[in-house]
Amino acid sequence: MKYLAPIFCLMLCIPLLAVTCNRPMEKLEEPRLKDIKLPEGFKIEVFAKVDNPRSMALGANGTVFVGNRDGDKVYALVDENKDGIAEKTYIIAQGLKDMPNGVAFKDGNLYVAEISKIWRYDNIEKHLANPPKPVLVYDKLPTDTHHGWKYIAFGPDGKLYVPIGAPCNICDNTDKDKRYASITRMNPDGTGFEIFANGVRNSVGFDWNPLTKDLWFTDNGRDMLGDDIPADELNRAEKPGMHFGYPFVHAGDLLDPEFGKGKNPKDYTPPQAKLNAHTAALGMKFYTGDQFPKAYKNQIFIAEHGSWNRKEPTGYRVTLVKLDGNKVISYEPFASGWLKNGKAWGRPVDVLQLKDGSLLVSDDFANLVYRITYDK
């Protein structure tokens, strides 16, 4: 009898080539989660096992779409019985060649961003087991792989926002292509492409303040200036055309030794908050749910992927930025413990609020998606 369950699962999966059975009815365990420190009343559990989960987007019916940077697939996670575990994992797309990191959802359709292309999968939640042929939305983005993977999201204006990272650690390539080191936007059908913000080295996460509708975004500081400079940034763009300093000024006040000569930091928009240097701040979201205590309402969660070239590693956590209006009043750890004794066993990438107010965290190192809940 003990062999019948795996065989039955396999039989179910064969007809639906897009489905991978995730051992339904069995709780997914990760013993190292006991090391994660959270504020009192919060709990973290495994929501799903996924290969290299990166950016996430939520469908209208609660489907969680997950992009992938090191592979060629895009996934859909479904928690059918609402027990906090995704019983089914669908492969929505495969064979994508250029880092399908970015995912966004609008009007029933899934948008997937590769390095230079954006695709659309129509009416996706009704076709998870047999996804439709993708529609090419836009294919004129730069092809550089350095900072080439994309985070995408739709703004309150209905436009799709797409960052284009600098194709280097530090350089000024805007004379070749003004789109480098920017955040751009376009209409859902790919028309109306324009640059929204300049001087953004590499943003892999942004969201809009639910109260003011301003765009807030993380930006990774340059490397090779030391362990403690420059700071990663949390920025706010309340209008188009703002310049945030790269490659001339870092973190609002640090002139670049190569490109900052003759520049005045006051000519550029400083960050709303300086985050820890080299922490690799990626996905961020304003919390708008009701499950967490009221003190978390309209505050910012940031996934910090962790440093790669610092003597003492930093990051590998989820942080909380508290606001008073548009003023940052604190920046503090919320979930930590993926870094233990100087070695990381997990690397948070993105955060996503579910409809019940719980918070998902993707981890492309442990190949897991976590769910954080609060028990009053």
Image (cartoon, grey):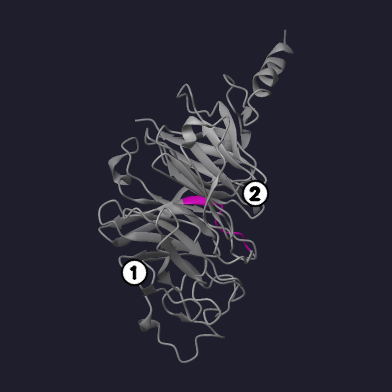
Quadrant of residue 40 within the rendered picture: top left
The percent position of residue 94, horizontal first and vertical second, equals 65, 42
Image position of 57 (left or right of 68) = left
In the picture of the structure, the residue carrying the numbered disc 2 is: 96
> In this view of the protein, which residue sits in the foreground, 355 or 28?
355
The percent position of residue 82, horizontal first and vertical second, equals 45, 24
Dot label at residue 207: none
Q: Is residue 240 magenta?
A: no
| Mark 1 nearby-residue class (10 Å; few <14, some 14–19, many ≥20) | some
Element at badge 2?
loop
Q: Quadrant of the C terminus?
A: top left
Q: Give the foreground label among 2 and 1.
A: 2
> In this view of the protein, which residue sits in the foreground, 135 or 65?
135
The residue at the far right in this view is 3
Image position of 65 (left or right of 330) = right
Q: Quadrant of the N terminus?
A: top right
Quadrant of residue 142 within the rendered picture: bottom right
Query: The disc labelled 1 sits on which kind of residue?
Result: Pro
In the picture of the structure, the residue carrying the numbered disc 1 is: 240
| Mark 2 nearby-residue class (10 Å; few <14, some 14–19, many ≥20) | some
Magenta stretch: dominant SS?
A: loop
Identify the residue at horizontal 25%, vertical 58% (top origin). Answer: 325
Asked if one can make out residue 323 in the rendered structure from this viewpoint, the answer is yes
Provide the residue span drawn in magenta.
312-318
The percent position of residue 6, horizontal first and vertical second, equals 70, 18
Identify the residue at horizontal 58%, vertical 79% (top origin). Answer: 171
Quadrant of residue 166 within the rendered picture: bottom right
The percent position of residue 339, horizontal first and vertical second, equals 60, 50
Image position of 325 (left or right of 222) = left
| N-term mark: 2 or 1 | 2
Asked if one can make out residue 42 in the rendered structure from this viewpoint, the answer is no
